Image: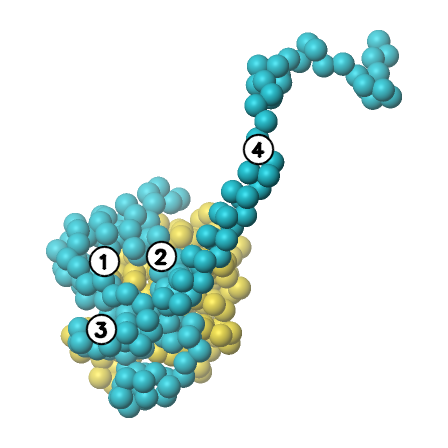
Chain colours: A cyan, B yellow
């Protein structure tokens, strides 16, 4: 029996002050470890490659990807964001935002696209919009369709060799 | 969006009917509860083991050996105690069936591996009675 959804379950846990304090830590510690590893994979970088780009040793990158590490410096996160070419949000938020993030988590939240990937996606959707607009201009939608005439069951009759009434 | 894993908690339906995982997380492992919540939320989205980008490996998930062979564990250290959540992964389901702590030389679990295996079978054979989707409260 599952009576309440995950969001409500998390909200119940938040009634405990200790859980709220833990969640502040774990949301960062677990979330950032998964993000660094996922972003590195998405960008086809080895730990050694990322270490070289940041001027650090490979074992440190390995530590950053460990969800039990928990000692991230804001300066490190800023440098990582620059290397991955993604944004970095550091904000004080209501706990509801942490719950929403955790419950609604999607793969793209963990490994967001880099700026160049975003740019490509925007260009693609712009070309789709352009194609749709061009189609509308070439074949303007007709206004002859009368919705009131479209659904009159009593006027439906068998056509050709279609349905026959044998009664 | 890809297929997600589903985590299930064991229900002690033949005893007092409690969710044993939830009870442990709200009791003995209270200091590790938020960690396991976040880990489960992230692991649900992981690609399968031995595939590109998978998180089904250390340091995220441990694959156990010896008497617990075939089980996986999630770990969190808090206050010199290592809390371990043990389960069995079968296709896209993870059955959480046992809990343990490791302090110094001492490693103890709430049930034996044999009982844990029985619990897994119960959760598969009689899902409405013995299992519940992982509860975060």
Nearer mark to the viewer, of 3 and 1: 3
Instruction: Tell which circle, 2 or 3, labels the residue nearer the N-terminal end.
Output: 3
Instruction: Tell which circle, 4 or 2, labels the residue nearer the N-terminal end.
Output: 2
Q: Is residue A109 left or right of residue A69?
A: right
**Location of the N terminus of chain A (image quadrant):** top left
Disc 2 target residue:
A105
Against A41, is B92 above or below? above
Circles 3 and 4 in contact, beta carbons < 8 Å: no
Q: Is residue B126 left or right of residue B35?
A: right
Circles 1 and 2 in contact, beta carbons < 8 Å: no
Against A52, is A39 above or below? above
Residue A130 versus residue B40: which sits nearer the camera?
A: A130
Against A15, is B25 above or below? below
Looking at the picture, do discs 3 and 1 lie on one chain? no
Disc 3 target residue:
A78
Label 4: element kind: loop
How many angstroms separate mark 1 from mark 2 (CA)? 24 Å
Disc 4 target residue:
A140
Please name the residue shown 40% across and 62% down the image: A118
Against B97, is A154 above or below? above
Q: Chain of mark 4?
A: A
Looking at the picture, do discs 3 and 4 lie on one chain? yes
Please name the residue shown 45% across and 62% down the image: A120
Label 3: element kind: helix
Q: Chain of mark 2?
A: A
Please name the residue shown 31% across and 77% down the image: A83
Q: How many marks?
A: 4
Instruction: Tell which circle, 3 or 4, labels the residue nearer the N-terminal end.
Output: 3
């Amino acid at each position: 029996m599952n009576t309440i959804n995950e969001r409500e379950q998390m909200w119940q846990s938040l009634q405990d002050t200790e859980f709220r304090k833990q969640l502040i830590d774990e949301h960062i510690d677990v979330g950032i470890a998964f993000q660094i590893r996922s972003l590195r994979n998405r960008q086809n970088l080895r730990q050694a490659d990322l270490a070289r780009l940041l001027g650090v040793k490979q074992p440190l990158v390995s530590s950053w990807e460990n969800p039990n590490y928990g000692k991230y410096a804001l300066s490190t996160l800023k440098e990582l964001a620059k290397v991955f070419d993604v944004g970095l949000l550091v904000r004080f938020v209501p706990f509801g935002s942490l719950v929403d993030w955790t419950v609604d988590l999607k793969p793209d939240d963990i490994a967001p696209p880099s700026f160049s990937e975003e740019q490509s996606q925007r260009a693609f959707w712009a070309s789709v919009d352009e194609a749709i607009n061009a189609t509308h201009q070439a074949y303007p939608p007709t206004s002859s369709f009368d919705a009131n005439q479209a659904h009159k069951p009593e006027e439906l009759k068998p056509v050709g060799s279609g349905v026959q009434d044998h009664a | 969006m890809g297929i997600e894993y589903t985590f299930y908690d064991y229900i002690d339906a033949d005893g007092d009917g409690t969710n044993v995982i939830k009870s442990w997380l709200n009791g003995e492992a209270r200091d590790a509860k938020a960690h396991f919540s976040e880990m489960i939320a992230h692991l649900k989205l992981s690609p399968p083991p031995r595939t590109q980008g998978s998180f089904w490996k250390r340091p995220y998930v441990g694959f156990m050996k010896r008497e617990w062979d075939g089980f996986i564990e999630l770990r969190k250290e808090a206050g010199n105690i290592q809390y371990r959540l043990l389960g069995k992964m079968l296709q896209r389901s993870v059955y959480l069936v046992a809990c343990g702590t490791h302090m110094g030389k001492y490693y103890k679990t709430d049930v034996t591996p044999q009982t844990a295996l029985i619990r897994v079978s119960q959760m598969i054979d009689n899902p409405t009675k013995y299992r519940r989707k992982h509860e975060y409260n």
